[in-house]
Amino acid sequence: MAKSGITTQGLRTAIERSGYYPGLVSEAVEAAVGQEPVASYLVHQETTFDANEVRRHVTVLVLTASRFIVSHTDEQAADDSSPTPYATTSTESVKIGRISSVVVSRVVANPEAYTPGTLPREVVLTIGWGAVSRIDLEPAACGDPNCEADHGYTGSSTADDLSLRVSEAGDGPDTVKQALAFAQALSEATAAAA
């Protein structure tokens, strides 16, 4: 990772502040970023409840001048493959020009009283670059409720390689602001690459 700049130091601090295996996460992110300066970032640590287990994971999104980098780290309980708990971390590097969509969904309370600049209650950031597509199919039907003919199927194809939700209640207002700032920087970068 580039060794200078406020954004790079901010990224390191955010990874350390998450408290989630900061040495492991930082090493993976730094290896993926290399010497490129960091233009924007988002660190999101999340705790989930899976059956009788509490599981944590962290996602780090990084924007450089030429790439969008996703790093994700999960912890695993001891199992047949490992007698001790372990973590799995992965990174993906995507050229900015490959990003096909950046969707920002904002949830606001009391929309009738909304004032521009007010922080949303939650933000969902969905980014697509063509690595994962989902097809949702359902039986097609006509308007006749008594029709028994086979009308085939209808559906939609959705590219949603990454979807990340942050909320003011769960993650705090600073994380929501950071998510919006990252989304704007990524949108601007993809527009410039087009």
Image: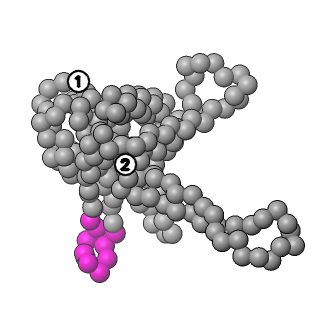
Image position of 153 (left or right of 66) = right
Q: Residue at x 26, y 57 (%)?
A: 89
Horizontal and vertical percent position of residue 119:
55, 26
Q: Nearer the viewer, residue 183 or 74?
A: 183
- Mark number, residue 20: none
- Is residue 80 within the magenta segment? yes
Would you place residue 58 above or below residue 9 in this image?
below
Instruction: First in sequence, mark 1 or 2: give its number.
Output: 1
Disc 1 and disc 2: Cα gap in Å?
28 Å
Horizontal and vertical percent position of residue 42:
35, 37
Q: Nearer the viewer, residue 178 or 67?
A: 67
Q: Residue at x 63, y 18 (%)?
A: 115
Q: Residue furthest bottom?
A: 80
Q: Nearer the viewer, residue 146 or 39?
A: 146
Q: Which residues are magenta?
A: 77-87
For the residue labelled by badge 2, is the local secondary structure a helix, a strand or a loop?
loop
Q: Residue at x 85, y 66 (%)?
A: 144
Residue 22 visible from this viewpoint: no
- Mark number, residue 6: 1
Instruction: Kindly indicate the quadrant of the structure image that contains residue 182.
Output: top left
Amino acid type at circle 1 is Ile
Model colouring = one colour
Q: Quadrant of the N terminus?
A: top left
Would you place residue 163 above or below residue 75 in this image?
above
